[in-house]
Amino acid sequence: MFIVNEIIEKWGIKAPCLNHYEYFLDYFYITMPSKIYNIEMYPEVIKDNDKLKQIEIYYDKAKRNKKLKEYYILEEKYISVLKYLWVYNDTEIILGKFLDKKFLNISFSEKEIRKINQIKDKTYKINKFSILQKFAKLGLREKATIHLVFKNFQIIVIITGLLIIIVDCGNHKSLICKIIKYNNLYFNENQK
């Protein structure tokens, strides 16, 4: 059974075998769109792509244009949100097909990589904030799509660039909103 199915079944949600990231998100977008939220740097979706291209920021573009300072400020806001979620939760990362292991050497020591590589198609418990931070940076810098499970809140967080998608299976929306607002980011309802 796919690890996401195991996780959400423990939370009382029965779903068909969600054996791929897109199927997992699509399932929730189609059957439970009210459970999907985005953490973003803009208060609403920017529909004018020409304008968006002029102002959007992501790691590789910032690096090329020598605007890393601006990028790092945004990155720290996202990492701070994840830190607060981590503090209140038992936190795991879903490893397997979701994580391209070739990018691990960007942030992790050889010892950490060996430990991570021993775990396949399972979850890896994150007990240290520094490890969470390293995984978050991989996702925020678009080097891998990161899937985190915050067990106490019953949420799955997907980090893909400077967009964090929350699949909320619990009842902690109010606290999550407070954390996001405290970090000057926006908590947007599903707009797919």
Image: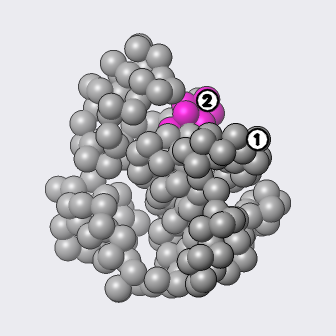
| Residue 9 seen in render | no
The relative height of residue 155 versus residue 81 in the rendered view (above or below) is below
Identify the mark at residue 1; answer none if there is no mark.
none
Please state which of residues 171 and 2 is positioned toward the viewer in this rendering: 2
Query: For the image shown, how many numbered marks are present on the structure?
Result: 2
Could you tell me which quadrant the N terminus lies in? bottom left
Q: Which residue is mark 2?
A: 130
Helix, strand or loop at disc 1?
A: helix
Q: Amino acid at mark 2?
A: Ser
From the viewer's perspective, is the residue at label 1 or at label 2 nearer?
A: 1
Q: Residues within 10 Å of mark 1 (few under 14, many from 20)?
A: few
What residue is drawn where x is 61% and y is 29%?
Answer: 130
Q: Is residue 68 left or right of residue 3?
A: right
Most common SS among magenta residues: helix
Q: Is residue 30 magenta?
A: no
Which residues make up the magenta segment?
Answer: 129-135
Image position of 5 with respect to 174: above or below: above
Amino acid, disc 1? Lys
Q: Secondary structure at mark 2?
A: helix
CA distance for labels 1 and 2: 21 Å
**Which residue sits at x=38%, y=22%?**
113
Q: Nearer the viewer, residue 140 or 187?
A: 140
* Residue drawn at x 27%, y 25% as measured from the top left: 118
Residue drawn 49% across the image and 78% down it: 35
Magenta segment: does it hold 132?
A: yes
Residue 99 lies, in percent from the top left, at 34, 43
Q: Which residue is mark 1?
A: 69
